[in-house]
Image (cartoon, rainbow, N blue to C red):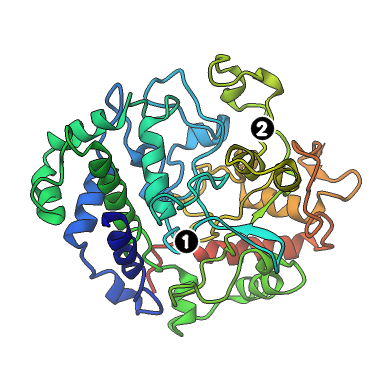
């Protein structure tokens, strides 16, 4: 009963964000539930050894994705609480994920939508909320926060400074590390989800949002970029510009999956992880949604058509960074690309013979099957590529009119 009741309430948290003037959004304060979630999100004691919080890999200053410029530049994949252990992908953005539906197949479109993590394995089938399920995943992942079990996470929350607030929100006895470990663990996940639904994580405060409100005009390059995005570049076919399911401003994703033919990230430290976590070693390739569906028990006729596909992310905050210039962000599920300009050029020229970046031809796709034919030879000029980048940069939160 707890799961169903809260799954309904968190969906309400996502409502009302819409087209609210930027100055009013800045005045919103967190609810007590959101405060609890924020405290857990930033708690560095919830790992083994202590030192890694959710925010270690999902930094607010960069749109709740990887906050370390050096790591983004060199590997894009972040170390876990045990510094010698690494996952296999760059951190996805935790912001603007509240509207992501549970994983489901749409026969009319012949595509899967919903679910979180890059491969959709936080399906939402258990808790009714993919965001809560994703929040709980890293705690028990030996390559991330490395806690031995849910009880240890429960016990750390029980002794945390915010434990009293947790029980105020959830009720007396809400932290029960003996008789109701699983229930307590789920409440932890739902608390994080509440924060990740909040206006602090999803402020809709970009230049583009100000443009939608009529508070500013886009300049010539940004206007051209938006026209290309919605038109001949075809970006909006996956990065939707329609209103979000909750009725708010566009999220720039249709929640689907695609294999864009990204090259292998040769600097991914996961290739050197012990056989316990990576039995394929340097031969490992990232099967994405296909592997999730295989693990869920679907037959080869289902999962093979999804092999190599990864979640279409929101483009909100895609280029948000602290300061200007020097900070490097990584792009793509494996962090292969190191600038928006490089990524847009790949979308435009992936299939053009001899094309590449900085004189180096594009490498072959890591997963050659199921590669999308919607990108690769868009015929855009370099000036049009630059216009697309200019538009994408209007999606960074924190704009002041």
Using the image as rendered, state which of residue 61 and residue 65 is in the foreground: 65
Residue at 80 percent of width and 43 percent of height: 369
Q: Is residue 393 above or below residue 81?
A: below
Q: Secondary structure at mark 2?
A: loop
Number of marks in the image? Answer: 2
Seen in the image, is 192 located left or right of residue 82?
A: left
Using the image as rendered, state which of residue 31 and residue 64 is in the foreground: 31
Q: CA distance from mark 1 to mark 2?
A: 26 Å
Q: Position of residue 15 (x, y in %)?
A: 35, 73
Q: Is residue 104 above or below residue 44?
A: below
Q: Secondary structure at mark 1?
A: loop
Q: Quadrant of residue 360?
A: top right
Residue at 56 percent of width and 65 percent of height: 252
> Few, some or many C-alpha atoms within 10 Å of disc 2 (few <14, some 14-19, many ≥20)?
many
Using the image as rendered, state which of residue 109 and residue 385 is in the foreground: 109
Using the image as rendered, state which of residue 356 and residue 268 is in the foreground: 268
Residue 349 badge: none
Residue at 76 percent of width and 46 percent of height: 301
Res 82 visible: yes
Q: Is residue 362 above or below residue 50?
A: below
Seen in the image, is 104 located left or right of residue 365?
A: left
Residue under pointer 1? 396
Q: Position of residue 357 (x, y in %)?
A: 76, 42
Res 323 visible: no
Seen in the image, is 47 located left or right of residue 214?
A: left
Residue under pointer 2? 265
The quadrant in which the C terminus is found is bottom left
Seen in the image, is 7 located left or right of residue 368?
A: left
Q: Quadrant of residue 365?
A: top right
Seen as rendered, the residue at the extreme right is 353
């Amino acid at each position: 009963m707890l799961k169903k009741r809260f799954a309904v309430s968190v969906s309400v948290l996502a409502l009302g964000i819409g087209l609210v003037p930027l100055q009013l959004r800045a005045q919103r304060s967190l609810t007590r539930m959101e405060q609890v979630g924020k405290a857990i999100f930033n708690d560095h004691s919830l790992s083994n050894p202590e030192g890694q919080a959710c925010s270690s890999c999902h930094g607010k200053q960069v749109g709740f994705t990887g906050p370390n410029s050096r790591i983004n530049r060199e590997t894009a994949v972040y170390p876990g609480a045990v510094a010698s252990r690494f996952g296999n992908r760059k951190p996805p953005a935790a912001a603007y994920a509240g509207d992501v539906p549970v994983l489901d197949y749409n026969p009319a479109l012949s595509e899967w939508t919903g679910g979180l993590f890059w491969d959709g394995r936080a399906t939402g089938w258990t808790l009714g909320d993919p965001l809560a399920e994703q929040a709980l995943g890293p705690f028990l992942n030996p390559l991330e926060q490395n806690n031995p079990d849910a009880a240890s996470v429960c016990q750390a929350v029980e002794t945390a400074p915010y434990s009293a607030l947790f029980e105020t929100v959830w009720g007396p006895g809400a932290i029960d590390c003996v008789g109701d470990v699983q229930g307590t663990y789920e409440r932890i996940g739902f608390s994080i989800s509440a924060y990740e639904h909040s206006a602090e994580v999803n402020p809709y405060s970009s230049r583009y949002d100000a443009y939608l409100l009529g508070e500013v005009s886009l300049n010539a390059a940004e206007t051209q970029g938006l026209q290309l995005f919605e038109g001949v570049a075809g970006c909006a076919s996956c990065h939707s510009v329609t209103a979000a399911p909750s009725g708010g401003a566009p999220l720039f994703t249709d929640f689907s999956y695609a294999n864009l033919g990204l090259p292998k990230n040769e600097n991914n430290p996961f290739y050197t992880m012990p056989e316990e976590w990576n039995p394929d070693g340097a031969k490992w390739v990232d099967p994405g949604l296909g592997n999730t569906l295989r693990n869920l028990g679907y037959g080869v006729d289902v999962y093979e058509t999804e092999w190599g596909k990864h979640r279409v992310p929101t483009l909100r905050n895609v280029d948000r960074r602290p300061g200007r210039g020097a900070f490097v962000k990584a792009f793509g599920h494996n962090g292969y690309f190191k600038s928006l300009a490089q990524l847009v050029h790949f979308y435009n020229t992936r299939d053009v013979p001899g094309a590449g970046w900085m004189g180096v031809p594009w490498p072959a796709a890591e997963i050659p099957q199921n590669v999308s034919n919607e990108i690769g030879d868009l015929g855009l000029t370099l000036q049009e590529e630059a216009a697309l980048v200019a538009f994408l940069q209007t999606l960074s939160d924190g704009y002041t009119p």
